[in-house]
Amino acid sequence: MSARGAIAALAVSALLAVSACSGEQGAADDTGSSTPAAKITVQVRADPEEAAVYRSLVTAYQKASGAQVDLVAVGRQDHLTRLSTAFASGDAPDAFLINYREYAPFVQRGAVAPVGPLLDQQGVDRAAYYEEPLRAFSYGGALQCMPQNISSLVVYWNRALFKQAGVAPPKTGWTWAEFVATARALTTAKTKGVGIDPSITRMAPFIWSSGGSIVDNDEAPTRTTLHEPGARAALQAVVDLIGTGTTPTKKQLAAQGLDEQFMTGKVAMFLSSRVEVPALREQRGLDFDVAALPVLGKPASVLHSDAYCVSSSSEHKDAAAKFIAYAVGQQGQTITALGGRTVPSLKAVATSPAFLSPARPPASSQVFLDAIPQLRHTPVTPSWPEVEDVIGNQLQRAFEDGVPLDQVLAEIQKQADPLLRGR
């Protein structure tokens, strides 16, 4: 059986097992309706392996409810563009999945119907969910979208390459110096020790770990603070790591993404969230696991969370809310957890074998849950996607082109601070 077929089989098994229980945790028990439910469209950001997980979710929901759902799976790079185009043309999906770093502009434009009251009508108990993603998706005093996951940033590592190099597996609480030494020990003529994207979501945990900050005020930022001592020290540590030759070159990155380099054994470690798991599971012969981030000062990690939003223009808001209640409920989150895509936001599923079973890689999924007390999220503000692009573009110059760090940080201030101040 193919991996995608296995995902579908697991989803059906999960549906039957959970349906045998007395009721949902977090969502209303009754998914049926005395009248035929309206057909809704749901757009998700998903590469092929992720899309298979969401198709299993939709199939299970349709069987349980009798409702119809048109799933639109869009690649990671095109999701936001397609959403914006759909809203501009008056053809927006009834519901859509979006990262917390990206939803505020849609709220500001009035494109989102706050999901809180809609899910209250469906009997969703928010107390059953982790608090951090709920905070991240609250804006203007209301819960705007309902989070499906609570991933953190972790280190993916290749067991075979560690064994070949005679390097011990990563341990919780390992220091930055130990991380650098491990990367160097894993680097050979054919393999780089580690890959790190030049993005603020990759840098944030190290900045916070070293006592720095990204902006002057997380709730209402007016300027970036990456040039200040704590943040600058963390960024310099990454620049120094790159200088050791343990990370892929600009040419290598242009030829193949970090995830693909990891899959093919060209990179022994890389940093990412839970989103990588479905694709990594499909890579034949790849034996991988996850480890906690190294620590510069105190433990820290950054939230990676997506949520379901309801379009304000939808004529079927109740039907959309009913689907969301199922997707984030016991049955829905069990299916997506088995598929590997999510760290469930529903506590009961996150701590269940559906997520934690070592029989399906990564064996150390508990690492994601252990990071929850240290999770923080980047600012939620309409200008943040633009600010994030500025930071990423500039850090890329420092990491890949050798531009002096202070020059890059000054350019970030010049370009990003006016965006935060709305100028």
Image (spheres, grey):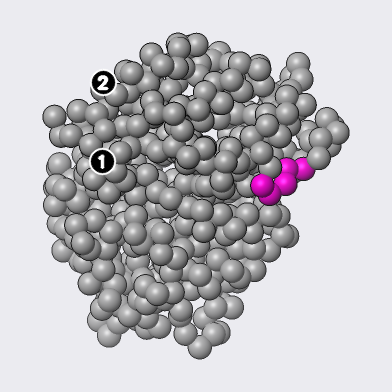
Q: Is residue 76 visible?
A: yes
Check the image and name the residue furthest to the bottom. 22
Identify the amino acid type marked 2. Lys
- Tell me the residue at 76%/20% (across/down): 188
Q: Which residues are magenta?
A: 169-173
Q: Position of residue 421 (x, y in %)?
A: 18, 34
The quadrant holding residue 184 is: top right
Give the side of residue 216 with respect to residue 183, left or right.
left
The verdict on residue 172 being magenta is yes
Q: Is residue 65 visible?
A: no
SS state under label 1: loop
Q: Which numbered disc flags the more N-terminal residue, 2 or 1?
A: 1
Give the SS element for disc 2: helix
Circles 2, 1 touching at the beta carbon (< 8 Å): no
- Label 2 environment density (alpha carbons within 10 Å; few <14, some 14–19, many ≥20): some
Q: CA distance from mark 2 to mark 1?
A: 15 Å
Where's residue 265, x and y in %? 71, 30
- Which quarter of the rendering shows the N terminus? bottom right
- Residue at 61% x, 70% y is 352
